[in-house]
Image: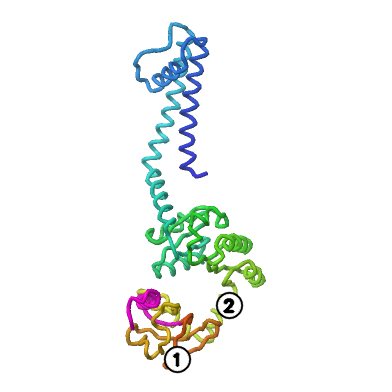
Amino acid sequence: MSDVKKKILTIIILLSSTIVFGSCGYYFISGGEESFIDCVYMTVITLTTVGYGEVVDVSNIWVKIYTMFLMLFGIGVLGYCISLTTAFLVEGELVKILKERRMKRAMSDLKDHYIVCGSGPIALHVVQELMKTEVPTVVIDEDAEDFTKQFSRNLVFWINGDPSDDDLLLEANIENAKGIVVTSSSDKDNLYITVSVRQLNPNIRIVAQTSCIKMKEKLQRVGANAIICTNAIGGLRMASEMIRPSVVSFLDKMLRHSGGTMRIEEIRVDSSSPLIGKTIAESNFKEKFNLLILAIMNSNGDIYYNPASRTVLKENDTLIVMGVREKVNQTRRLTRDELHKI
């Protein structure tokens, strides 16, 4: 239970208990001669020190003693509740609750967004790159709120909790998500999260992290589309730095450029694309969009590198291109909606 809920529950329990205790005390001391609602009224005006006048006969010495006790004890409880309420408002927790509710409503409307499970160093780089694509991202982790403070809240949402919890995954609108990145530091947690995700959304793309190459096969069996072995990637990177430093430097500068706009991206030729049946030369990718086609992957998964200009584009082809991200997005809209004829 969150600290906010604990404070609210504490205030409700203390006030309710004090009023019930005070009312029952008046009722039993008076021997049942007073109505219970009068006893409740007497308790409330005693605690609030309104002083409208007693509705319970205070000529009884025990009623007087009980009233003094209730005033001392009850006003202390009331003061404590007021201090909790004041802190609740002053510390901005009420505003925080309202923001969380708005964020949850916004998450329920998300579509084709990404989900990141984890808030470690790898998740940091994942979210930074996803931010550059300007696609909404939801981070799920125990410390997700603190983790996302460094990002724009317009694009990065957060949910505090266990990423393997089905309720939290549903709250992140996983049914309409485009993909999920599983970056927990524990391989077992990543395996369990992958199982949960695949059950909730059979069609989502899952990219999972593992530090053990032996875990790769298990993650594949439970539904991960891509498994990144961080140790293997690190080793390959170090070898590449030794063997082909200029290539690595080129890729690094492209990815870390201050503008962050040059990328190697993929463009899918769907069934409604006006590119179907056109050659690369006829599509004018270079002249109109300043995109360089590095390779084409067909529907069978075969890849043709550095395709010739006379190559005909077919349905379900995936173009691997290098260029400015805005131009890539423009081309995707073209292939998806046929807004601009080439």
Q: Which of marks 2 and 1 is in front?
A: 1
Mark 1: give few (<14), some (14-19) or many (20+) Cα within 10 Å: some
Mark 2: give few (<14), some (14-19) or many (20+) Cα within 10 Å: few
Q: Is mark 1 on a helix, strand or loop?
A: loop
- Mark 1 sits on what residue? 311
Q: Provide residue 16's location: percent of width, then percent of height.
A: 48, 28
Q: Provide residue 278's location: percent of width, then percent of height.
A: 40, 88
Can you say whether 14 is above or below 340 in the image?
Answer: above
Amino acid type at mark 2:
Gly
> Which residue is located at x 50 percent, y 57 percent?
140
Q: How is the image coloured?
A: rainbow
Q: Can residue 146 be seen in this view?
A: yes
Left or right, residue 51 beside residue 247: left
Q: Provide residue 162's location: percent of width, then percent of height.
A: 55, 54
Q: Residue 226 carries which label?
A: none
Amino acid type at mark 1:
Thr
Mark earlier in primary sequence (2, 1): 2
> How many numbered badges does the structure rendering display?
2
Q: Provide residue 321's location: percent of width, then percent of height.
A: 43, 82
Farthest residue, direction top: 59
CA–CA distance between discs 2 and 1?
Answer: 37 Å
Q: Is residue 257 visible?
A: no
Assign the C terminus to one quadrant of the image: bottom left
Which is more toward the observer, 173 or 101? Answer: 173
Q: Is mark 2 on a helix, strand or loop?
A: helix
Can you say whether 214 is above or below 138 in the image?
Answer: below
- Mark 2 sits on what residue? 235
- Residue 156 quadrant: bottom left
What span is in magenta? 319-342
Is 83 covered by the magenta stretch? Answer: no
Can you say whether 94 is above or below 229 in the image?
Answer: above
